[in-house]
Image (cartoon, rainbow, N blue to C red):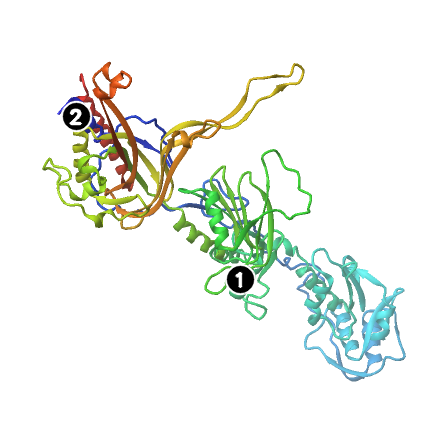
Amino acid sequence: MDLRALWVRWILVVAGLSVGGACTVSHPHKPEPSVSIARAPSPPVIHPAPPPISEVISLGDPDDKKPLKTEVKIYPGSGTFVKPQGGYKGPPPSDDRGEYTLNFENTDLQEVVKAVLGDLLKENYFIDPKVAGTTTIQTTRPLKRHELLPTLENLLRLNGASLLRAEGMYKILPSAQAARGSPPSSVSRLAAARGFTIRVVPLRYASARELHKLIEPFLPQDAPQIVDAQRNLLILTGSEQEIQAAVELVELFDADWLSGMSMALFKLQHAEVKTLHGELEKIFGEKDSPLAGVVRMVPVERLNALLVVSSRPGYLDQARNWIERLDQIGDSVSPRLYVYRVQNGKAADLAAVLGGIFGAEAKPSEAGAPPPEFAPGETQTTLESEAEPPTPGGGLSKSTRSKTKGTERGGVSVVATETLRIIADETNNALLIMAKVQDYKMIEAALKRLDVIPLQVLIEATVVDITLTDDLRYGIEWLFRNSAPGSGNIGQGKLDLAGLDAIAPGFSYALMSGNRVRAVLNALADQGKLNVLSSPSLMVLDNQTATIKVVDEVPVITQARTPVDTVNQDSIDQLQSVEFKEVGVILEVTPRVNLGGRITLDLSQEVSEVDRTPARVNTAGNPSFIQRNVQTTVTVQSGESLVLGGLISETKIQSNSGIPFLKDIPVLGALFSQTRDFTDRQELIVLLTPRAVRDEAEARAVTEEFRHRLRELESIKPGG
């Protein structure tokens, strides 16, 4: 075995490893290192992607991304709603015993008035002729002097009369007439007043109308009372004692009611205030419940907040507990803004997929409308949806025709319904989703299945050119099927015609063991019949296309023109337009890995060559090109080798051999020479070995294996 055969054998074992999503390798036609066929690893296990980062964006979100809580501001009150009892209580009590005893039985009312006012009190008085009647009164204990007048007022009231002091004397008038003839007095002059009186009571805090409703049951029924809501006044009529009792009630309830109330403003983060208000009303009771009026809740829709007012501060704590329990993310009616940070794919691709799921379709701008102005590099895109996704079973809410316009810069906008909007932010690789909560749950479930870690596939390729002679005259496929690796013989056996089945005319493939393929190629290398054109190794993402090129660029004249000098009528040098055409082998591979680790390969192979036969050269001097294309789809297990062959080319060669100098003599040279015609047959073989890479650990193992091969090659290179 010579040094050249040893060198080619090790070339088949070691190859370069380049990692990329889709790689293009261009080389001239010269021997290059190839890659060895790796042993088939165990089927890869598809690991789920880590949970995607999805967050809800709302005004006032904390930077630490903690769950949003209901904001609350509490304004405690004093809890005091009435004033301490006070006011005029009459003359101070005295230990002196009374000295006046009243004992009348069926006595005329005028006689009783004369006895009390005239005889006992020595006061001047006037009695209206309309005042008449009889009365009976008997005191069980002697009365004091200041008690005589109130006792007389009660007797007169029972007979429909009132005692009124005016112009320095007392007047006894019918009750209806007394109210009109009595001048009003203020509360401060109450202690000096006697008899029937009209009192004007101004209120400071309470409403005159509401306070009158509160004390009305305690006022005399036959005494008219007036409410002046505009001035917030109460006008009371009655005797001294009646008015005094009414004034005490007014002062009791005319307190700073608002400062006594405790209030809390709850700013909701998730729920709608109108919905939450209805739920809390059922908890704390409605109009007929025991808490009616004690706890009041006022929805503030402008702030999406709830104002809770209560006379008991403790109720605010209970209201806070229930509001925080109910203010949770639910199936809110209004849409919310979500930001989904894509982890493994492209935001624009996911937006396009979601747009297809929810019925959005990108359409060009309407014709006839003047195009809007955009910054350089921006174009207009219109997306429109007419579909109505189903609503039962947690589907999207009823959709309507909707349209949006956006630009291609910064992302693609997709609209599915009036309340659903998806925008891809390509700069940050994120999706901005404006949707209802129930709609976003469905979208997020789809994103978790779409945004997964893609598998990678290591494709080890070897492109070789084999000279077909002797046992190889039927092609390399027959050799693979009939050779006996390890025996040192190649091509021993009969031709298996069934093995020559081709996917396309002149093309066939076979799935072989990597060790068997390596043995055959090593044997061919020993015989000098193998020429390695390219041996790249590249990493490609699942369902992405890798391109391998082993090409030369051939210049082709596309246009020729000879300009003429119009002044001197002389021709100028000819001008030519030249393009370069790629000639050689172009292989495109798109792998797809299933859950079991089996790899499906979409293959597209193109082989082209230059035909410089004089009959095939055009007038411009351009040669013809022979091109063969094959497209197919095959399935292999990870680590299994795929051999693509059957692309055979033939070249007819005429050789002339003989005795030097003598064979060149005209006419007589044929006696000293020999002319022989033979055909040179070459077959192009592409050897592919896909290998699924599951995770970073396997990727590091592949890299380490490549380094090990390089070290072995370094140890055996010539002169090493």
Q: Who's the residue at 88% across and 64% down the image?
A: 168
Percent position (x, y) of residue 581? 43, 30
Q: Residue furthest bottom?
A: 106
Query: Which of the two residues, 81 or 660, is positioned nearer the viewer here?
Result: 660
The quarter holding residue 615 reads top left
User: Compared to 300, does 700 lie above or below?
Assistant: above
Percent position (x, y) of residue 318? 49, 58
Q: Quadrant of the N terminus?
A: top left
Q: Quadrant of the C terminus?
A: top left
Query: Which of the two residues, 257 or 588, is positioned nearer the viewer here?
Result: 588
* Crowd around label 1: few <14 · some 14–19 · many ≥20 (10 Å): some
Residue 604 appears in view: yes
Q: Secondary structure at mark 1?
A: helix
Residue 310 appears in view: no
* Crowd around label 2: few <14 · some 14–19 · many ≥20 (10 Å): some
The quarter holding residue 372 reads top right
Q: Secondary structure at mark 2?
A: helix
Q: Who's the residue at 73% across and 64% down the image?
A: 209
Three-letter code, disc 1: Leu
On the rendered structure, is 25 left or right of 178? Answer: left
The label shown at residue 611 is none
The label shown at residue 280 is 1
The residue under label 2 is 6
Three-letter code, disc 2: Leu
